[in-house]
Image (cartoon, rainbow, N blue to C red):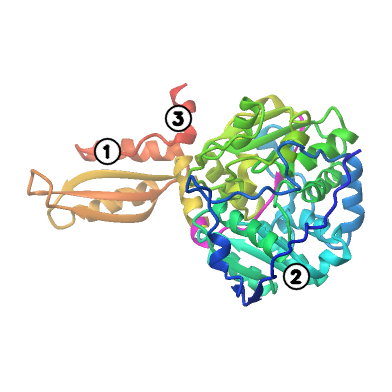
Amino acid sequence: MSETVNTDTPKDDSDSTTTINGSAVNGKLEDLKRPRHVSGGVEEIIDPFCNPEKPQRISFHDVTSAAFLIRGGVERTPCPKSTSSELYGMELYLKKDFLQFTGSFKERGARYALLSLTEEQKKKGVISASLGNHAQALSYHGWKLNIPVTVVMPKAATIMKIQKCRSFKARVIVDGNDMGEAKSLAMRMSREEGLLYVNGYDHPHIMAGQGTIGLEILEQVPDPDAVVVPVGGGGLIAGIATAVKALSPKTKIIGVESEKCASFTRALENNGPIHTPIKNTLADGLAVPKVGYNAYATAKPLIDRMVVVKEEWIAVAILRLVEEEKCVVEGAGGAGLAAILAGHLDELKGKKVVVLLCGGNIDTTVFGRCLERGLAAVGRLVKFNVEVSDRPGGINDLCALLYRVGVSIKDIMHERAWLRDIYTVEVKVVCETVDWSHSMELKNELKKFYAKVQFSDVPLALTTEVES
């Protein structure tokens, strides 16, 4: 049985801060940002619901309570069998939680956390820091439940996600160079204004709400051999593992992280949450520098395995899901399938596996880059340089050869200035092929007619296969 969570926020005797359109007046937003230690670092305020000294573990009862409260308020998302199950060599099911109204699983925990507030707290409202998905979910359900919501978003947050939160009537403050600074400001505002801070991955109610995905999975796919879950701050896998292990102890819980933000893997190595340097990643929804203390305490005894995948495989997963399943997901949403594509879960071949597609909020520009990177990773988008005659018709002959081989030219440019032979021109071509063997056919055909042909490296996603 989990500990009882009190959602009352300690009262502060200081004057309350009046706010207009997200800016603090009298109390001054700037003053909230100023407190610092003598060392020069920003003052840290501990979240009472995420105390490292007393981590709270959620129970199966917490998850079922969440399921009862949020039913009718969030979508019961489908979990169909993948159209490419035979290709992957396993009975693969895809839990499509990116089909929630705001595009991610975060709605479950957000709604449960809001419904669990006291009447007094519902009037005061809540606050949180988020790059996007949690902010949108909290804003949307706060709007639907008539509970005031304030979200602090770092400057790196996309304009689209900022505007979405504002469209849900939330007070949005864009400040902080990263999530750490945004959270510090949100925590200080929480103390000054008497708002409840809702951690997006470590609050007990958030974890319990996310665990309802596990209940749905077991209803839709009885007795799965494994459930593959993307891992960021740890709240999602903690909730799902709690639900699944209670009803189906033999089902394996497998977590997946990007190599650019493997904070849970490092926590396991450290035997506790530890700060992990984060690099830019396609799976920005998983980029949490330190996993939650509650999430870690809950998930550690329930997780069977953690897997770390390369960025290229996440790009390939996004591409595969678009082409084969007609699903548009963000990097975090594709991480689970990426682990299968990379060959990290070959022991699951022939078994019944559920992969969670947890989010679909991907920026259109980033989406385009992901598709191109995925094509390049599997050898379907290739780049080569070739020296051709600079006489009239030289480039035309090259294009005719490409046409005969059956490739599609995506980009082409020629260079004269940096060649020793003034009668030749270097042509740089980016083209799309059917697969890597088709690219090799193109390479061999070019070498028959041209002396100098240089191809880009073997795609990372095929390196092991080619070397073997």
Where does the magenta region start and end? 351-366
Q: Which secondary structure lies at badge 3?
A: helix
Residue at (55% x, 65% y) in the render: 31
**First in sequence: mark 1 vs mark 3:** 1
Q: Residue under circle 1?
A: 454
> Residue pushed farthest top?
468
Q: Is residue 367 left or right of residue 237?
A: left
Tell me how far mark 1 sits from mark 3, CA to CA: 18 Å
Q: Nearer the viewer, mark 1 or mark 3?
A: 3
Give the label on residue 148, or none. 2
* Left or right of 331 in this view: 404: left
Marks 3 and 2, the one that precedes in the sequence: 2
Q: Amino acid at mark 2?
A: Pro
Q: Quadrant of residue 92?
A: top right
Residue at x 88%, y 33% (from the top left corner): 248
Q: Position of residue 352 (x, y in %)?
A: 78, 33
Report the mark closest to the observer, 3 or 2: 2
